[in-house]
Amino acid sequence: MEREARFRNKITWFTFVFSVLVVWVHSTNGELFLGQMPDLRRVEAFEHFMGNTIAQIAVPGFFMMSGYLFYSNFSWGSLEKKWDSRIRSVLVPFLLWNFIYYLGYVAGSRLPVVTDIVGKGKVPLDWYTAVEAVLNYTYNYVFWYLYQLILLILLAPVIYGILKRRVIGIAALIVLFCFVQKGCVIPLLNLDALLYYGTAAFWGIHGTEYVQGRWTWKRGLAGAAAAASAIMILNIPWPAGIGGRVWYRLVMPQGLWLMINSDWLPGARWWMKYNFFLYATHFALVRLLNKTAARFFSGYWPAPILLFLAMPGIMVWFSSRAGVRLRARLPRLWVLLNGGR
């Protein structure tokens, strides 16, 4: 495999793994099945470890891959082209999926059997609610990631202007980490998203060879050390703020990237390449499956664990099969929904 092909294959593998982890983030279900039963505590403890600890590197990983790919070989002259491609790959799917989710909730809230499972009451069908739902991802909560990504893409001139000077860029990222660690908040923009995205953007500007170059044992050991630091610091009580979690989410994806030799990875299977479609469709389906299963297996403690563990496989199976059919039968709609991927 050529260097670029190995890099793209590694991106697909990481994107697939992060997508599986995102499904686990949204699959916690103990309370639905067990209510206040004694078994609830151990079910929640396991699902919390998987979904709220292990899987918390997923969305930071997405931000970092997006930031790196945007700023790799970036120049002022390429800005317009970069923006144009992200209109098709980010903005159009954001608007279209939000509208589809809105219509889905409108329909579901009017079907007697589904209404109780949806749990939204009767969703209004009018232009004001539709526009608000599309712009603010009201019924498609996972698209907060795309909303933040759109803001970060619009800030490209500012981000590049700061990061293109190596020393100033490093200083800016350190200051930003301190702000995030202190829990600072600004309107609209999520500062930890900016930290993850900006860190990878820095590597895209200054470290392409380091990120995409041939793997060495030195690089692998550096990645292992980074991953170990992320795990250790996660369990150290910080005097203030959320520094341990931020460091874990920032460093662990980078450590894993450095640890894993792209030559070790076989070619990604076809069903691993529907990751955006998986991300866009999984949330409502996960909720529907969990709530429906809880009606039939309420009180049985193995049920939530088994469904939780199986949920990524179910979602990967559904998204890949549904994606293949949609791509074959409605290719133009598929291009819009999947952002040309």
Image (cartoon, rainbow, N blue to C red):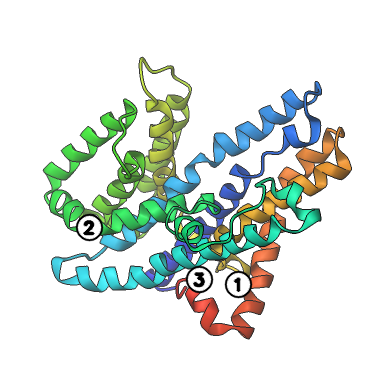
Name the spot of residue 228 as percent of width and height, x first.
Answer: 45, 32
Q: Residues within 10 Å of mark 1 (few under 14, many from 20)?
A: few
Q: Name the residue type under label 3.
A: Asn
Q: Is residue 28 left or right of residue 63?
A: right
Q: Is residue 300 left or right of residue 54?
A: right
Mark with earlier residue (3, 1): 1
Q: Quadrant of residue 110?
A: bottom right
Q: Which mark is residue 338?
A: 3
Residue 45 in view in this figure: yes
How far, Cα to Cα, is label 1 from label 2? 33 Å
Q: Nearer the viewer, mark 1 or mark 2?
A: 2
Q: Which residue has dot 1 on it?
A: 270
Q: Quadrant of residue 25?
A: top right
Residue 310 in view in this figure: no
Q: Nearer the viewer, mark 3 or mark 1?
A: 3
Mark with earlier residue (3, 2): 2
Mark with earlier residue (1, 2): 2
How far, Cα to Cα, is label 3 from label 2? 23 Å
Q: Are marks 3 and 1 in contact (CB under 8 Å)?
A: no
Q: Is residue 203 left or right of residue 278?
A: left
Which residue occupies 42% across, 46% down?
A: 60
Q: Name the residue type under label 2.
A: Ala
Which residue occupies 12% across, 42% down?
A: 168
